Amino acid sequence: MELKLINARYLDTDTMSIKSGDIGIDKGKFVSVGSASDHEADRVIDIKNNLVIPGFNDAHTHSPMVFLRSYAEDLPLDRWLNEAVFPHEAKLTAEDNYILTQLAVCEYLSSGITSCFDMYYFPDAMAKAFKETGFRCVFCGALNNFSESLEKLEDYYIRFNSYDPLISYKLGFHAEYTTSRELMEGIAQLAHKYKAPVWCHNSETFSETKDCIGRYGMTPTELMDSIGLFEYGGGGYHCVYLSENDLDIFSRKGLTAVTNPASNAKLASGIADLVKISEKGINLAVGTDGAASNNALDMFREMYLACVLQKLKYNDASAMNAEYILRAAIVGGAKAMGLENCGNISEGMNADFAVIDMTRPNMQPENNIIKNIVFSGSKENVIMTAVGGRILYEKGEFFIGEDLDYLYRKTSEICERIFSE
């Protein structure tokens, strides 16, 4: 369906500035930006001087973990994982993950998120859910000592990188502390075979980093680099306890650090040093993590925390600026996920976008629109979200091919079964 957005303002992420003009969309791409007077469209949408932004690229998620929202609470990370998360995750089926992924998609869309970088199990069922809802997903391998295998990882890599235009796959594993050196070396061989980047949870907690040094005499980043995991790029999720040498490795190898401030704060894991990451020129992306540790899939809250926690960490109100974080949530995520045609509203790019209602009280006055988005913006401001030019969310309604009441009922049934066993 061809679209024309008229009377729009839009965010140019190349210059991080607000521009005005009409926007034409055809075959899932932006085809005219600034002037679309000659663009024929099936639907013309009057944006009414509201703001069109490129969709947020949520760079770290575990979508089916919505079933654990507000269930595993008030526990440190090790007990949270081993007592509340892992035992219940083991009871999930492929059909469960199909339903739960669709529910997560609805939450992403209502927050202006148009893609996610997901690490979880039963990727076939999840890929089906993402494709059917029309949502963009990049999968990351979830290999560890307890599940999956190198053979499965390679199979997933091959199959899902030719599955559908909305779906792609990156090599990855859960974390150093759940994955043997032998398995990591096997992943490094795959990375070299396919000249592919590798991703994992990295230095999320102090104990994780300390224990790795105890086992190998190296930090997780140093260990992974030493066995060749990062020869073709990649990065890490969380990155709270990166050493100076770790940061140098990230910079030298062109790695991305994905920050997850809400999850790290809620689990008392710590505050990642985004100031140092930015000073080193390391690509920064923003992720929500899963709903079990967050508990919301809300990029507005992530951006706010990413900014203000740096100010608190440094006891300096100038320590982090909103423009940097907003760009990280859009462009940084697209770069991390290998979405070369996402992250800006320009001709030829994928028409993944959200419309921000600037008439809400929290967006007035417009002294600085970008700072309003980061510091006072919320999900209530998102009135439309589209992926590949297809509108999937508009003014509280979802157009994903599934009934919300059905998803809610099925999710409740999944939780009742799992938590009662």
Image (cartoon, rainbow, N blue to C red):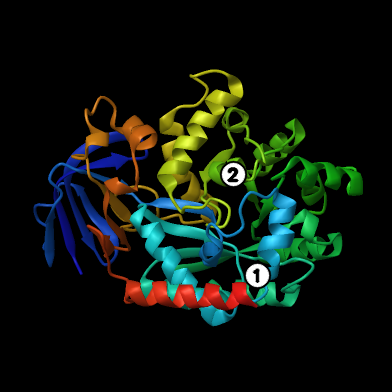
Q: Which SS class for mark 1?
A: helix
Indicate the quadrant where residue 181 lies.
bottom right
Q: Residue furthest front?
A: 420
106 lies left or right of 167: left
Q: Which SS class for mark 2?
A: helix
Q: Which residue position is annotated with label 2?
A: 266
Residue 357 place in picture, x, y as percent:
22, 44
41 lies left or right of 340: left
Residue 42 place in picture, x, y as percent:
12, 67
Q: Is residue 30 above or below residue 49?
A: below
| Residue at x-position 52% and y-position 44% | 285
Residue 80 in view: yes
Indicate the quadrant where residue 39 lies.
bottom left
Q: Could you tell me which quadrant the N terminus lies in?
A: bottom left
Q: Which residue position is annotated with label 1?
A: 88
Residue 96 place in picture, x, y as percent:
53, 77
Q: Amino acid at mark 2?
A: Lys
Q: Is residue 15 above or below residue 154?
A: above
341 lies left or right of 239: left
The residue lying toward the viewer, choosing from 237 and 327, is 237
| Residue at x-position 76% and y-position 40% | 206
Q: Earlier in the sequence, mark 2 or mark 1?
A: 1
The Cα–Cα distance between marks 2 and 1, rounded to whole angstroms, is: 20 Å
Q: Amino acid at mark 1?
A: His
Within-10-Å neighbours for mark 2: few <14, some 14–19, many 20+: some
Indicate the quadrant where residue 342 lies.
bottom left
